[in-house]
Amino acid sequence: TGYITYDPGFVNTGSASSAITYIDGDAGVLRYRGYPIEQLAQRSSFLEVSYLLIYGDLPSKEQLSAFVDRIQRHTLLHEDLKRFFDGFPRDAHPMPVLSSAVSALSTFYQDSLNPFDQTSVELSTIRLLAKVPTIAAYAYKKSIGQPFLYPDNSLGLVENYLRMTFGLPAEPYEVDPDIARALDQLFILHADHEQNCSTSTVRMVGSSEANLFASVSAGINALFGPLHGGANAAVLDMLSDIKADGGDVGKFVERVKNKEAGVRLMGFGHRVYKNYDPRAKIIKKTADDILSKLGKNDELLDIAKKLEETALSDDYFIQRNLYPNVDFYTGLIYRALGFPTEYFTVLFALGRLPGWIAHWREMMTDPARKIGRPRQVYTGAPQREYTPLDQR
Ligand code: CMC
């Protein structure tokens, strides 16, 4: 079978060549299509960044408004797809609800089944960007037993999403521009991160020539896990546990250092960033701004700050190059905006969506594309003879 490189977790294996996102983990650099994340977070918008990731360059004014217009015309869900939500238990976790509904898009839009038809790939791209926020809002509405709102396409994507999530049919919903801007910025910061677990999953599934909806649905499931997208919720659970236990940060850090089973400092550490996560720097400030604007004196924010300070001056974390990652502060912002903890990972999915789409499209048009098929190192029994049941 030839020589096989054993690389669990693909720590050193380049699975793709890609022109989308550049990361220098030692220097804390993140760029989308060459543009530094700091500039995009401050000056761009989520839909402009989506265009950039998917098509490769910043759009002109005309290109952006055509793109936004097209997305706005696809925000409705098919009435039959809406009924889908009735089948789930009310306390269902919103991530499998989201992935199921995205998977179901293949049944409503069967033109998507040919992954090489450029017109339908374009349409599937627009449909995903337009409909996933609606699906996400309905997953929330379903969980609290409130009626679904139709999209209001006079609003921008994030405003529309906030209204469908927190608005009520009989009442006007005023979107706070600062909150919409903060959420837009969080989506920008999550929009791509090269070959992370969910994006690699999207590529792996797509490499079998599965369509965009099936591949993105698989990516949502990969994001669900607590070591990936689920970390933002896990951070909040951790902070709440520390608070319930009397707020002693030092005691918790000792448990982490003693490697108690299942106790990790959630929101710390990263496979690639070994100095700092540039996204965490931006988010920390947004967390401060939003929490003070909303007048939320969140005790959990104080615990988070103490925890960060304690960990950053502790040898265990210094030696292992463990720093806060993007998820350390996002949960606090989401909580301040009124999202329940188990919903946080859905917000990560909304942000990561353009990245998944961009990678799927890049892979499908790559002349070097091959089906993903890793090898293994076999550690099982050598050949043995079958014994009949009555002799065992
Ligand atoms: N708390 C305590 N110890 C840690 C942590 C942590 N959060 N992260 C790593 N370590 C230790 C680990 O125990 C190991 O120590 P030792 O060498 O003594 O065995 C060393 O640091 C190296 O860790 P690793 O598990 O080999 O590192 P990795 O690159 O495989 O894991 C990670 C990266 C992000 C999965 C991990 O740091 C982690 O579990 N962090 C907590 C979960 C989290 O915040 N995830 C979000 C990541 S960023 C957004 C995203 O990708 O979704």
Image: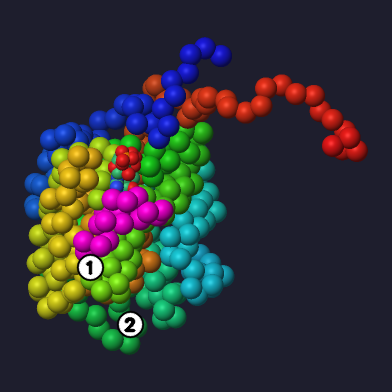
Q: Which mark is residue 168?
A: 2
Using residue 76 as the reference point, say whether residue 172 is left or right of it: left
Using residue 117 as the reference point, say whether residue 196 is left or right of it: left
Crowdedness near tag 1: few (<14), some (14–19) or many (≥20) residues, C-alpha within 10 Å: some
Return the x and y of residue 380 as percentages of the image width and height. Answer: 62, 28
Instruction: Residue 176: name its quadrant.
Output: bottom left
Does residue 78 appear in the picture of this structure? no
- The three-letter amino acid code for the residue at tag 2 is Leu
Location of mark 1 (residue): 248
Circle 1: element type: loop
Q: Residue furthest bottom?
A: 170
Residue closer to the observer: 121 or 259? 259
Name the image quarter holding the N terminus: top right
Residue 300, above or below 378 = below
- The three-letter amino acid code for the residue at tag 1 is Asp
Instruction: Give the color scheme: rainbow, by chain, secondary structure or one colour.
Output: rainbow
Residue at 12%, 50% (x, y): give it: 313
